[in-house]
Every structure is written in C-alpha cells, then in structure tokens.
C-alpha cells in the first residue's frame, strides 16, 4: 500500500460541503443564553462611568455587566513570549475597566435570551468617556513628547542581533542600497467568524471555540481565570480557517467562561464580520528600514535591518514574537559576511497585532526579495542572475546562515530552472523590451521571488532559547481496535488543512491497514488530551511525525505478539502490507488478527500489555525549510494605474509530499493571500483612530475572478530533520507571492523612474507614482 | 450586524402597499434587500416597518411597449440581463447589469431597488440617466412620471416622496445606428465602481452624430457628461475624440473615500470616457 504521495480526495469534504457541520455557532445547549459586547467607539479614553441598569431592565435580558463587575476575576489576557529583558507587558483586562485603548475594545456586555434582544440592549448602556489622545503613527509614538498608550511609554521592547562585522561590510562597499518598506496592517479574514460557547455543570466547564489551539487555550484559560485546569475541557469543533487569527486567547473566550460560571447557564457569543474586522487580532504592520552592501559584481557583503513593529494597544499571545520570527529570515537564501537585525516594538491605540499566515517570515522575505531586485537594477543585472551569484548552492547544504540557522537541504538552482522554463522567462523578457520600445501604454513587468522560510514550529530547545513560554513538540496516539480498525488521535488541531486525510495516508502505509479503516480524532482536550495545536506550518512535520512514531511503536508491539503466536524470533518476521510472515514459510498473522489477540489478551507474551496501541511525541531537532521560485508577470495599464497579473508560476520544494492535492490547495490559497497583500488588502484607521475598513466593501479580498490560473510544480528535496523528509507547506505560498507581485509591478515601471510602490499597489498609488 | 426591531408586511396589492407606506412615515419599501438590509444590520437605518413589494404583479416583469421597454421595479438584475427584449432594444442596460455585483446579489437585487436607492456608486443610475428613462410611480395621489434627469436628487436621495412607490421605468428604444458600452473601473470583480462610464453613440457616415454619456460615482448623483456630448457632435473618430473626452470631469464633484481621491477620479473619468466612446462607436 503506498498511500503517501497519492492525490486522495479529502475525507473531510463530503460532510463539510453538504453542510453537516459542527461550527461552534451551530451548537446549542439547553437554556443557552446569548452574549453581546458593547465596544469602545473611542481609540483612547478614560472610562468615567458605565451604567448598565437600563439594559438590565429590558425584556429578555438576563444580565448586563461592565468591566468593573469582573475586575476582580477576569485576570489579564496572556502574552507567552517576552522577547527581551526590556519588554513591557501591560495589564490587558478582557473587558476594559478604567481605560480603553483601541476602537472595538469591550467595555460591557449583555446576556439575553436571544442575540437580537442582546443587541438591542447594548444601545441602552451608557458609558462616559473622557477622551485621551490617540497614538497612531509609530514614529510619532516614539518621540519623547508623544502621548502615551500605557503609563510606561510607547516602546514595548527592543531587540538587537548582530552577526559578523557589519561596519566592515558597509565600509567602502561599492554598492549600498538603502530602502524603507511598509508592511501594511492586514485583517486575517477566516471564512468562519469567531464563536464561543461555554457551559458548566456547576463544577467543571466545557468551552467550544473556533480556535486553532484548544490545548494551549485550556492551559491559558486556567491561568487567566484561576479555574483549575483539570476542570476545563476545551473543544474546537469544525473550525473554518484561522490563518493565525485563531491562535489566540481572546477576551471573549475568557468572558464566556466567566459568564457561564457566574450565571450557571450556557452562554454563546458569535461575532459579526464587522465586529471581527475590529477585534480579530490584525497582522503585519511594520516599517522596515533596510540597508544592503554589495560588491560591484552583485555579491552581498552585509545587510542591516531596522524594524518598527506595531504591537497595537496590548501584547497578546505571541504579539512581540511575530517580528522576531523574521529575525533570522531577512538573509533569505543568500550568503553574506555580516548581518544586523534591530527591532523596536511600538504601542499604538489600535487593535493588537499577532500571528497572521507566515508571521514574521512574509515580512522578512518581502524585505530581502525586494532588495535583491533593487540591487539587480542598480547593477543592471537580471534579478535572477543577482540571486544566482548569492544563493547557497545545492552542494553546500547543510549550510549555517549568517543569522545562525542551519538549512538542512535545498536546491534553489533546480526550482529556478524549472520555474523559468514553465514561465517562458526569456520570451516574456523579450515582450517586455518590445513594449518598452513601442511605448505601449500597457507595460509588462516580471517579478521574481526565490524564497525560503523556517517552519515546522519548532524545536523545543530553540523556543526555550528564544524565551517562548512553551515547547514545540507534538503528540500522537494510534489505537488498533478489536475489529482491526484504527483510531488515530492527534494533538494537531486542523481547521481546514485536511489532517484527517493525510494522517490516514501516513498510518495506512505504516501499519498496512486500508485508508478507509482509519479515523482521526482531534480538537478536544478530553479526547486528544496532549497537543500543541496547529500553526506555523507545523502539523505534518511535527504532528504527522508523532503519528508515524506511534505507528512504529504499535508495529514493534505487534511484532512481539506475532513472534509469540507464531513461535519464532521477532527477527524472523517480515512485515509487509499489514502482515507479519515467518521468513521462508506460509506462517503469518495480520495486524488485525494481532489487534484482536491483544484485545482478548488470552495469551500475551511476558511484558506485553493488553491492546495494540501506543503514544508518541515528536520534538524536531530543527525547523523545516521549504523553498521555491515564484515568477509573476504583471500588466500595468499606465493610463489608469491598474496592475493585473497575467501569469504566475510557482515551483515549490516542500520535501516529501504526502498528498499532492492538499499541497496544491495550500499553495493556491497561499498565493492568493500573498497576492491580496500586494494588491488589495489594507486595514485603514482614520486620524481619530477609527477603523474605516469594517466591511468587505472597504476591506477588499480577491476572489477566484480576480486571480489568474496558477501554474504550479514542484521539486522534491527531502528534509533531513524528520523521517518522512517532509517540510511545511501552509505558509509558503503567502510568503513567496507578495514580493513576486510587487517586484513585477516595480519592474514594469522602472524605466519611468519608479523604484517602489507602497502596498497594496492600488491603481491610484501606481497612477500617482507615474505622475 | 443585528438590525433593530421592525415590523414586516407583505403587501397584497399595490394599493395596499401605498396605504401601508402612507400610514407610517418611518416605513420603507423592501425590494431585494441587497442595499436596505446591510443598512439595517449596520444600524445605519431604523425603519419602523418594511413593506415587501416583492409579489406585486404591477412591479414585475420586463415588457415590450413598442417605442420603449418597460422594466418593472421588481425585475431582478438576473432577469433583466437575460431578457430578450432588453438585450435587443436596450442592450446598454443588459450589458451594465451583468457587471453589477455577483450572481448571488443579481438574483435578489432589483432594477427598481438599485435606482430608488440612489447610490451614486451603483451602475444602473448612470445608464438610465444617459438613456433618458422615465420613472413611473404610484402614491396616494395617484400615478406620476418622473424624467431621469429629475429623479436622482442627492446622495441616497431620490425624487420619490414619502409613501410613493416606484412601479417601473420606461427605457426609450434608441433604434438603429447606436453603439453602446459600459466601462466599469473597480479593483476586484465583486466591488463597486470607483468610476463608471455609460456611453451610447450614434454614428453616421463615420462621424459621431450623437453621444449620451452617464458617469457613475463622479458626484453625489449620477451625472451626464454634457460637455463631452457636445464636443463629440459631428466629430470623426480619431484624435478629436480624445480631446473631447478631456472634458469628462467638467462640472463633477467626485467623492473622496477609501478607494480614490477626487483628482484621480477626474483623471479616470477622462480616460474611461474615451475608452467607452471608442468601444461604443466601434460596436454595432
Ligand atoms: C455585495 C454587494 C455588491 C453589490 N455591488 C453592486 C455593484 O457593483 N453595482 C451596483 O449597481 N449595485 C451593487 N449592489 C447593489 C445591488 O445592485 C442592489 O440590488 C441594489 O442596490 C438595491 O436593490 P434591491 O432590490 O436589493 O433594493 P433594496 O435593498 O430592497 O432597497 C433599496 C432602497 O430602495 C428602496 N426601494 C426599493 N424598491 C423600491 C420601490 N419599488 N419603490 C420605492 N422605493 C424602493 C428601498 O426602500 C431602499 O431604500 C451590490 C449589493 C451587494 C449586497
């Protein structure tokens, strides 16, 4: 049976597509009440009074509370990543008590018998605010006379990392490129809005949430609320996408738990899309100052990175860690002698930022890939040629980079050659030259992105070294049932990725049981009690490997049992297609028969316990480093400024592929999301700190109609850090595509003196750049 | 995204609908709900009552009436864009309707609703203005006709009086020799026009005999590009057309919003009008 590598359709899909789903908002509990939150209309203000009494008197309203009513009990939302000695982690009450610091922060709540009555009652709550100055611009926030977001000031932390002699690299460098790029603020837009349902039997609590992290959430809810961890069960039922936005411990989760505790009734909260745009943590938002020193032939001497990273008003679960995930990625796939990374986290009166697909790595990749194009332009070299002169050659792996990571494997030459051929690189360059000569109002640009990224988060010892508050292992259990079917339990928490299918494929090959005979359980701390959840392209390379290890243990036990039953030495047994066979004989036992024998336990060998099952954890020794070459051709209408993608080629190397269909889906979705940053998405706050992009009419997301057919292909250079040779794929497309698109737009306009367009590259921005 | 409380009635007849509206000044007509319900859900509107006119026979269907086509207010976008009469006799309406939103919205949203709503970013108002449609209404005072030039009063404000219902719109047939085009400029397929240009052009002997141009989102109401229409009269296709289109933004007051600043919209109006005219003049 070779299931691994097969383009299996996903086991999950029939149920999801026919609506037989268990989204949190679909769930009901007897006597369930509905919660709605009143949210601050002010970016920054002192709360001088909250009066909920009129709301309490309305029909259907069961209770109404202000932040003050929970002040003693609600704790502070956690930040698990104190990245530096100087970090300031401000108190973050789930419901504001004395001060609000962004528009949308919860100040009060209503619990009613239905959502409609709760929404009406919100309008009866009176809040007195004493306005305080909004703090919106990172540079201004750091000025000594700036109004403060928190008493301790607007600087959240500073980090500096240096490797090699940076001064020497820049001294007398023949070429120095100096650029500032802006990573605009983005709103992760998972298809399923957030939703929470909490209930209690008076002693213990169950919380369903549209979360990526049921296990982390359980621990954190216990820490924040003081409810003992063993009294809390967290369930992530069907979850419709997250992209990092559901890698969070939210105010609403904490408050629903506390409300059910106080009222003794089940309570549910589901956000609206506009509420989500305001209060789902945002992504990106950096100002990147980059300096690159190079030789006249294009070889890089050194790179200096100075970031301002907008934290928003508070530090949430991994807020300060996000820019630092890029710290060792700005050097990309390139060799250099010196590197310096500096980052200042800045508080502003906006929604906090946190992980969003790629978290830190898209920002870094954008920076270096844009700079490589600028270097090529400066030296009048083809952008791929400059990259060739600098990248790590395939025979140089494993390679320790200037920022200290060891890339285990890769083949940038192979991916690039394949991509160029599929793209028709030379032909498009010829067409570009022709259009330039003719002065065609529609100019052609070609964008290159030869990226890598670190994912498969993460080796626990490396997380420890980075002062992260948890480990990076994953857990898996494999249980052979008496009838020969298999239950796999995983600590990964899928929310659209297709783990049930992929884990079935891995298990099928490992145990020799049919794909159909395997079920995968996940996302419930009572059913899958051990886990570190799903984010950072970690599930296959960590969680999938844990399952593989558990299968190996099951096989070892089965071998012992088979040798006992077949009266031979374990070494005399061959295992293939689920059957143990005594070498050179017809004597055999199938793994299903062994599972039954282990269940009855009538005749087990010394030291072998009943049942054929096993647990394993896997802690990777290194990150995984997928890479690839993405090429994008863009047509820019110079009369209107409209940029349109004409063709897009992505050759990705994600190591060993378990399911090509799933990989393809991840790459497609990833590219779309990266293109969206380049062309469409931007969270905009006005001068008073109001979010203007609260609906999808204003926060533009592309659909299939706006995207070209992606041409995708692969090279397969196995990872050496796990037995499958797999690398993460969940974020690769997003990381690669943003610079590919912007490089193409700038390439189209370079003869007109343009060397940057700020993202999103709207037609208006392009038009203004051309004037 | 939960509306405040409101009452709902489904009118059994046009007379009943008119009465329901007349009886309550905070009542509103509900057509496809594609513009009204978002306003309610965002709590930007608090009507006391919605009067559903969805099933009234007087408001439905598309009818060939000889020199004009009568499009019932409740005809959905999807119905309009597939209608044989509309495609044959007012093809600019059919073409533009295919560019409204997406299939889901087009199956619910109505021709009348998108005109009565008076959203200057809507695509159809500029078309009906350019084609000089006539709005037919009903109120307690009886039936009334309102020429398109008087219908669009201000941002989200029509000439409809309280209690007055739009029954349908007469679109005059242009006859032979006309070409048409709608040039919609928007960032994603499903988003509203930043600027749109509706053009109908009559050619004779290679020259432009007459041009009608309506602009979307170039002010609080749709506007006619009168200066361009005049400048184009009698012009041969060529450089002079471009020159005439330089007047496209004259007397407009385009909005400033997240999607564009006024100077950029003016620029777009000029470029897109030129494109629309060339296209219209080239099409049969
Ligand atoms: C996602 C989305 C995208 C869209 N994109 C576009 C687009 O690109 N271009 C575009 O042009 N439109 C767009 N629309 C709007 C769409 O065309 C709507 O259908 C239209 O604006 C309103 O029509 P309706 O039938 O839904 O009217 P409703 O929403 O029911 O009513 C709108 C207003 O008109 C009034 N009204 C309706 N019918 C009558 C009547 N017979 N008499 C008196 N008053 C009446 C109502 O009281 C209300 O004030 C979009 C809508 C959505 C939801």
Image: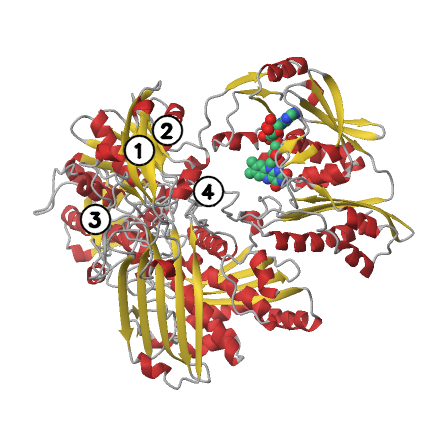
- Chain letter behind tag 3: A
Residue B148's x, y, as percent? 74, 33
Q: Label 4: which residue? A: A694
Residue at disc 4, secondary structure? loop
Q: Are there few (<14), some (14-19), or many (20+) residues within 10 Å of tag 1?
A: many
Foreground: disc 4 or disc 3? 4
Whole-Å distance between the Cαs marked 4 and 2? Answer: 19 Å
Camera sees residue B23: yes
Chain-order first, disc 1 or disc 3:
1
Whole-Å distance between the Cαs marked 1 and 3? Answer: 52 Å
Residue B162's x, y, as percent? 63, 22
**Contact (Cβ within 8 Å) of mark 2 with mark 1:** yes
Q: Label 1: which residue? A: A108
Q: Are there few (<14), some (14-19), or many (20+) residues within 10 Å of tag 4?
A: some
Cβ of mark 2 under 8 Å from ligand 1: the answer is no
Colouring chosen for the image of the structure: secondary structure
Q: Label 2: which residue? A: A122
Q: Label 3: which residue? A: A554
Camera sees residue B60: no
- Residue at mark 1 shares a chain with residue at mark 4: yes
> Vertical placement of B96 versus A677: above or below?
above
């Amino acid at each position: 049976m070779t299931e691994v590598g097969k383009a299996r359709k996903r086991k999950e899909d029939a149920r999801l597509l026919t609506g037989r789903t268990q989204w949190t908002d679909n769930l009901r509990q007897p006597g369930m009440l509905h919660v709605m939150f009143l949210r601050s209309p002010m970016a920054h203000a002192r709360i001088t009074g909250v009066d909920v009494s009129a709301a309490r008197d309305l029909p259907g309203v069961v209770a109404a509370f202000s932040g003050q009513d929970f002040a003693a009990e609600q704790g502070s939302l956690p930040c698990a990543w104190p990245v530096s000695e100087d970090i300031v982690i401000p108190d973050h009450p789930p419901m504001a008590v004395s001060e609000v610091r962004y528009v949308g922060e919860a100040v009060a709540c209503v619990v009613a018998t239905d959502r409609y009555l709760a929404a009406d009652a919100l309008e009866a709550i009176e809040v007195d605010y004493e306005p305080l100055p909004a703090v919106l611009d990172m540079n201004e926030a750091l000025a000594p006379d700036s109004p403060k977001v928190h008493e301790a000031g607007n600087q959240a932390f500073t980090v500096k990392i240096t490797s090699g002699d940076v001064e020497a690299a820049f001294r007398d460098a023949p070429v120095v490129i100096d650029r500032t790029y802006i990573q605009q603020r983005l709103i992760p837009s998972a298809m399923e809005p957030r939703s929470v349902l909490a209930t209690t039997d008076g002693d213990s609590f169950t919380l369903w949430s549209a979360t990526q992290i049921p296990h982390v959430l359980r621990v954190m809810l216990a820490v924040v609320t003081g409810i003992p961890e063993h009294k809390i069960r967290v369930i992530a039922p069907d979850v419709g996408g997250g992209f990092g936005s559901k890698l969070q411990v939210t105010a609403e989760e904490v408050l629903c738990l506390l409300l059910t505790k106080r009222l003794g009734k089940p309570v549910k909260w589901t956000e609206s899309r506009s509420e989500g745009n305001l209060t789902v943590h945002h992504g990106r938002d950096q100002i990147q100052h980059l300096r690159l020193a190079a030789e006249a032939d294009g070889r890089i001497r050194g790179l200096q990175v100075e970031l301002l990273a907008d934290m928003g008003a508070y530090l949430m679960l991994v807020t300060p860690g996000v820019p630092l995930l890029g710290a060792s990625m700005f050097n990309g796939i390139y060799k250099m002698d010196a590197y310096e990374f500096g980052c200042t986290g800045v508080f502003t009166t906006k929604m906090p930022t946190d992980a969003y697909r790629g978290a830190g790595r898209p920002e870094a990749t954008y920076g270096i890939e844009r700079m490589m194009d600028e270097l090529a332009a400066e030296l009048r070299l083809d952008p791929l040629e400059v990259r060739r002169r600098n990248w790590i050659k395939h025979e140089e792996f494993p390679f320790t980079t200037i920022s200290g990571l060891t890339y285990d494997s890769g083949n940038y030459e192979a991916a690039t050659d394949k991509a160029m051929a599929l793209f028709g690189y030379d032909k498009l360059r010829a067409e570009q030259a022709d259009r330039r000569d003719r002065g065609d109002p529609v100019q052609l640009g070609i964008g290159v992105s030869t990226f890598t990224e670190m994912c498969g988060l993460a080796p626990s010892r490396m997380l420890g070294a980075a002062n992260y508050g948890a480990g990076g292992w994953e857990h898996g259990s494999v249980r052979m049932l008496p009838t020969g079917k298999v239950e796999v339990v995983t600590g990964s928490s899928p929310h659209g990725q297709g783990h049930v299918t992929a884990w079935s494929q891995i298990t099928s090959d490992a145990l020799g049981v049919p794909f159909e005979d395997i079920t995968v359980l996940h996302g419930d701390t009572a059913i899958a009690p051990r886990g570190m959840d799903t984010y950072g392209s970690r599930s296959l390379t960590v969680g999938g490997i844990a399952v593989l290890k558990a299968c190996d243990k099951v096989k070892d036990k089965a071998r012992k049992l088979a040798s006992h039953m077949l009266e031979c030495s374990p070494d005399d047994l061959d295992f293939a297609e689920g059957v143990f066979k005594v070498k050179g004989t017809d004597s055999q036992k199938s793994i299903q028969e062994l599972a039954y024998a282990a269940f009855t336990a009538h005749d087990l060998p010394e030291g072998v316990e009943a049942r054929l099952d096993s647990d394993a954890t896997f802690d990777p020794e290194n990150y995984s480093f997928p890479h690839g070459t993405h090429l994008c051709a863009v047509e820019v209408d110079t009369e209107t400024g409209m940029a349109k993608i004409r063709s897009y080629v992505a050759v990705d190397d994600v190591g060993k592929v378990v399911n090509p269909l799933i990989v393809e889906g991840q790459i497609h979705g990833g590219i779309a999301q990266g293109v969206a940053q380049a062309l469409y998405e931007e969270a905009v706050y006005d001068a008073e700190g109001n979010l203007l992009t609260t609906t999808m009419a204003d926060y533009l997301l592309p659909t299939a109609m706006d995207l070209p057919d992606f041409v995708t292909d692969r090279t397969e250079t196995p990872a050496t850090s796990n037995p499958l040779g797999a690398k993460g794929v969940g974020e690769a497309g997003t990381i690669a595509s943003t610079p590919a698109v912007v490089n193409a737009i700038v390439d189209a306009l370079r003869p007109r003196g343009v060397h940057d367009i700020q993202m999103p590259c709207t037609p208006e921005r392009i038009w203004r750049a051309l004037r | 995204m939960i509306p405040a409380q409101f009452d709902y009635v489904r009118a059994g007849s046009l007379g009943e609908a008119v009465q329901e509206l007349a009886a309550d000044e905070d009542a509103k007509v509900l057509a496809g709900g594609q513009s009204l319900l978002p306003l309610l859900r965002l709590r930007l509107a608090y009507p006391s009552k919605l009067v559903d006119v969805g099933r009234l026979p007087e408001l439905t269907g598309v009818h060939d009436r000889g020199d004009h086509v009568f499009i019932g207010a409740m005809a959905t976008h999807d119905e309009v864009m597939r209608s044989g009469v509309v495609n044959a006799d007012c093809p600019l309406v059919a073409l533009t309707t295919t560019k409204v939103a997406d299939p889901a919205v087009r199956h619910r949203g109505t021709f009348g609703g998108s005109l009565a709503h008076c959203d200057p970013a809507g695509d159809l108002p500029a078309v009906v203005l350019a084609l000089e449609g006539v709005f037919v209404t009903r109120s307690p005072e009886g039936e009334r006709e309102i020429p398109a030039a008087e219908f669009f009063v201000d941002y989200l404000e029509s000439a409809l009086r309280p209690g007055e219902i739009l029954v349908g719109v007469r679109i005059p047939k242009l006859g032979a020799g006309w070409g048409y085009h709608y040039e919609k400029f928007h960032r994603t397929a499903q988003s509203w026009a930043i600027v749109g240009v509706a053009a109908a052009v009559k050619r004779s002997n290679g020259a432009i005999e007459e041009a009608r141009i309506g602009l979307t989102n170039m002010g609080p109401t749709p506007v006619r590009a009168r200066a361009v229409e005049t400048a184009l009269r009698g012009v041969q296709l060529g450089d002079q057309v471009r020159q005439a289109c330089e007047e496209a933004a004259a007397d407009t007051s385009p909005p400033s919003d997240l999607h564009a600043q006024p100077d950029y919209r003016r620029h777009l109006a000029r470029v897109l009008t030129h494109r629309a005219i060339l296209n219209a003049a080239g099409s049969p």
